[in-house]
């Protein structure tokens, strides 16, 4: 039987999160066209293989589990693309709850607009008490995203979909390639950016990318992400990776302007803390971490392609 949609989920040592995701996913309304569920076990060493082996799948589901030993979300996603049977590959994460209409909403978008790629809305769902310093401006760093309240094309390099809720026509990878294995999470390494890089390559190649707020994913936030250090680490790694890619094989001496940006960012933190208190400064402290990451990445980061 031909398959129209491959729903792909990549997981690494998150059996506890995955268990709830699978229970919630059972409430998914099936699309009109045939679909399959593909799980990529990315070198799991916890109870994930046993969980998947004993899980009772809903009647009528086509489910496959493949294992990818090369650690890294990009490697896992590339494995999903290679093994997918669907015309479209649609990704969600192992700590998310899909709205029951999620897949059907994408099917409606495909029927009307024939997109090459697409993304949908993500809503943060707190599993623990939200700390007072976690202001709305920070929710995007936890996956909150709503580009538009209506269906619309995505045409700008600075309006990408997010990695927890997106899909694309599988054949686009023949022109733009897969996900950059230098980017994306690798175990405890929280480096991201692989979906933004992929999105921009889609635009550069002239593919049609669409947005729908009707395809909703709820991103469940664990306690470990409700620490200031999580946000600082996120931005540090982002700065480090951007510096490595920008520097390439050039000089390891960081540009002088980076030190100026770091000093200005530190001064901004001090000024805001005096006026509004420590709970108000997290976003500006993230900027400090970002410039520290840029400086250290430029000076000590590996040469791209050698890592």
Image (cartoon, helix red, strand yellow):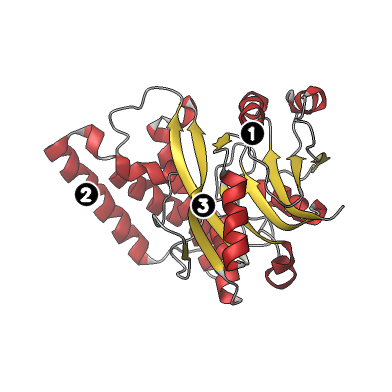
The answer, for residue 12, to whether it is visible in the render is: yes
- Density class for disc 1 (Cα within 10 Å; few <14, some 14-19, many ≥20) is some
Residue that carries the numbered disc 3 in the rendered image = 120
113, 260: nearer the viewer: 113
What residue did someone put label 2 on?
268
Residue, disc 1 = 25
Q: Which of disc 1 and disc 3 is earlier in sequence?
A: 1
Instruction: Give me the C-alpha separation between circle 3 and circle 1.
Output: 17 Å
Q: Cβ–Cβ below 8 Å for labels 3 and 2?
A: no
Of the residues tagged 3 and 2, which is closer to the observer? 3
Q: Do callouts 3 and 1 mark residues in contact (Cβ within 8 Å)?
A: no
To which quarter of the image does residue 281 belong?
A: top left
Describe the element under mark 1 as helix, strand or loop.
helix
Residue 128 shows which numbered tag? Answer: none
Q: Residue at x 45, y 69 (%)?
A: 156
* Label 2 or label 1, whichever comes before in sequence order: 1
Distance from Cα at disc 2 to Cα at disc 1:
44 Å
Real-space CA distance between mark 3 and mark 2, rounded to the nearest whole angstrom: 35 Å
Going 80% across and 36% down the picture, which residue do you hit?
60
Q: Is residue 236 above or below residue 159?
A: above
Between marks 2 and 1 in the image, the one whose residue lies nearer the viewer: 1
């Amino acid at each position: 039987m031909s398959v129209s949609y491959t729903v792909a989920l990549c997981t690494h040592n998150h059996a506890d999160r995955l268990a709830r995701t699978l229970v919630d996913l059972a409430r998914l309304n099936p699309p009109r066209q045939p679909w399959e569920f593909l799980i990529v076990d990315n070198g799991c060493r916890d109870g994930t293989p046993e969980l998947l082996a004993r899980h009772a799948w809903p009647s009528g589901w086509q489910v496959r589990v493949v294992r990818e030993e090369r650690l890294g979300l990009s490697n896992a996603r590339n494995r999903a693309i290679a093994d997918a049977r669907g015309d479209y590959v649609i990704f969600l994460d192992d700590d998310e709850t899909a709205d029951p209409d999620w897949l059907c909403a994408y099917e409606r978008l495909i029927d009307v607009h024939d997109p090459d790629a697409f993304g949908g809305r993500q809503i943060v769902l707190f599993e623990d008490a939200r700390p007072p310093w976690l202001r709305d401006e920070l929710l995007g760093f936890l996956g909150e995203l709503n580009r538009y309240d209506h269906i619309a094309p995505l045409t700008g390099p600075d309006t990408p979909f997010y990695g927890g809720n997106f899909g694309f026509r599988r054949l686009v990878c023949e022109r733009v390639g897969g996900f950059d294995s230098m980017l994306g999470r690798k175990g405890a390494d929280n480096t991201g950016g692989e979906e933004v890089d992929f999105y921009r390559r889609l635009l550069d190649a002239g593919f049609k990318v669409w947005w729908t707020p009707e395809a909703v994913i709820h991103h469940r936030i664990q306690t470990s992400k409700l620490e200031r250090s999580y946000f600082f680490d996120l931005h540090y790694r982002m700065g480090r990776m951007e510096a490595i890619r920008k520097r390439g094989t050039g000089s390891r001496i960081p540009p002088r302007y980076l030190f100026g940006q770091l000093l200005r960012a530190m001064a901004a933190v001090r000024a805001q803390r005096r006026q509004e208190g420590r709970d108000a400064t997290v976003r500006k402290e993230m900027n400090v971490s970002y410039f520290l990451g840029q400086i250290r990445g430029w000076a000590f980061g590996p040469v791209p392609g050698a890592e």
